Image (spheres, grey):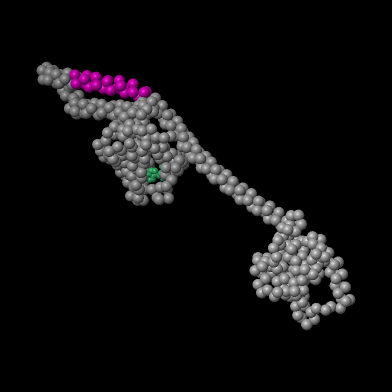
Amino acid sequence: MKLTTQAEVDLSEFFDGHPVATFAINREHVITHWNRACEQLLGWTRACMVGTRNQWQPFYTKERPLLSDLLVSGEDNIGAHYPGQTRRSTLIPGAYESEDFFPNIGASGHWLHFTAAPLRDAEGNLVGAIETLRDVTERRVAENALRKSRDSLEHIVEKRTAQLAQANDKLEDDIRQLTELNDMLTTAQQQLVQSEKMASIGQLAAGVAHEINNPIGYIFSNVGTLQNYLEQLFGMLDAYQQAEASIAQPAVTVQLRAMREQIDLDFLRQDIPALMRESREGIVRVRHIVEDLKDFSRADAGQQWTRANLHQGIDSTLNIVANEVKYRADVVKAYGEIPEIECLPLQINQVVLNLVINAAQAMGTERGLITLRTGMADPHTVKLEVEDSGPGIPPEALSRIFDPFFTTKAVGKGTGLGLSLAYGIVKKHGGRIEVDTEPGRGSCFRVLLPIRHTEVAA
Ligand SMILES: Nc1ncnc2c1ncn2[C@@H]1O[C@H](COP(=O)(O)OP(=O)(O)O)[C@@H](O)[C@H]1O
Ligand SMILES: [Mg+2]
């Protein structure tokens, strides 16, 4: 390599004054140039470096080739020496650039971006290589800081997201608990409304029963006395009739016969006892109804767990609802053998009442049939079925019939509370209600009640 003197001077000055740290090596890897910026950046003077092959010294603790050395030795796989960060320069043909951290430079090391380009003579032969070094520590530090803060931001976001998810879970849990509580409240409120209603109906019934009880009592006993008197009177009449033959005046006899025929005494003799019998039966029935009303309204008995005969309860309830039922359906009782059950009798009566009234109300214009069936479901459980020949329950309604306020009946006719109340009562008894229904075929409500009462968790 022989450059003109003029060019050499120019090049040296240009080299020296150039603000970017730059050095050059020849084909023998000997340093030919080492500018001032290079001295400043790397802390090694030109006097130390030029003419030596110690270009590695400012960078590494052990001898190894730099990018410019690799270019000079015609290394194929430059990337292998600076893995991951070396690439071909997009500006200068045959040049490479790379970036790395050098802990030995300065007090705490420096990030350098370095570019090495081949030097060629006029014929294009390789004569050496030139390498520039840019200090990118600030940028890298800023990048690192940025990356760190981004990482920590991501971490915070992750943490916050997890916390939010947790809070969300907790919220969902709270909402679920609140919903449950609300449901419980609704049920309690319904039962309160209903028991309030039942209490006032009960009071009314008790009052009416009490009022009727007295007059019925003396009518009943008077009818008994009256029957006695009548028997005596008829005896007396018989005696008179027998004495008739011995009456001397024919006019009197004729008059008596005329009167007897006019009032049809023979008919009266037959009819009066029949009338008396019917009246007595009527009064007996009224007494029954009064008894049932009293039973039904005896709130105190209804509030205590007692052993009760289910059949008696059904019977008295049927009497209460007779009016509601008798024009719509015939009632068939198919009672099985069942023991007394431990229950709140008034409330069980109410379940029966609600089911029977629903069955009656389900009937269309045609007279239907309601069957009340009892029996054992298993050794510990009694079953009571109220079956009707009504229209059945369509599937879309079936899932909702136990919901409070669900009704398909006209305003004022249905409250939609009957089944929900029945459900609540049966549940309180530790039992359950099942429904079999088929549109057009009727419905069967089956109440299953344990014989023994065990406290059900509230
Ligand atoms: N035996 C039955 N046959 C047909 N539908 C019934 C029967 N029992 C109940 N239902 C349906 O269930 C609904 C809810 O009944 P219920 O809770 O007693 O309220 P309500 O009788 O006041 O409507 C009724 O409106 C009716 O649609
Ligand atoms: Mg009802």
* 396 shown above or below 207: below
* 62 shown above or below 125: above
Residue at point 27% right, 27% down?
Answer: 284
* Visible residue check, residue 434: yes
Magenta-drawn segment: 210-232
* Nearest to the observer: residue 72 or residue 116: 72
Left or right? Give the position of 202 relative to 85.
left
Q: Position of residue 159 (x, y in %)?
A: 61, 48
Residue at point 68% right, 53% down?
Answer: 148
Residue at point 38% right, 32% down?
Answer: 455
Q: Which residue lies most toward the right here?
A: 6
Magenta run includes residue 297 = no
* Nearest to the observer: residue 262 or residue 58: 58
Magenta run includes residue 230 = yes
Q: Which image quadrant is residue 357 in?
A: top left
The dominant secondary structure in magenta is helix
Q: Position of residue 212 (x, y in %)?
A: 35, 24
Q: Which image quadrant is residue 56 in?
A: bottom right
* Nearest to the observer: residue 59 or residue 434: 59
Q: Position of residue 287 (x, y in %)?
A: 30, 26
* Visible residue check, residue 130: no
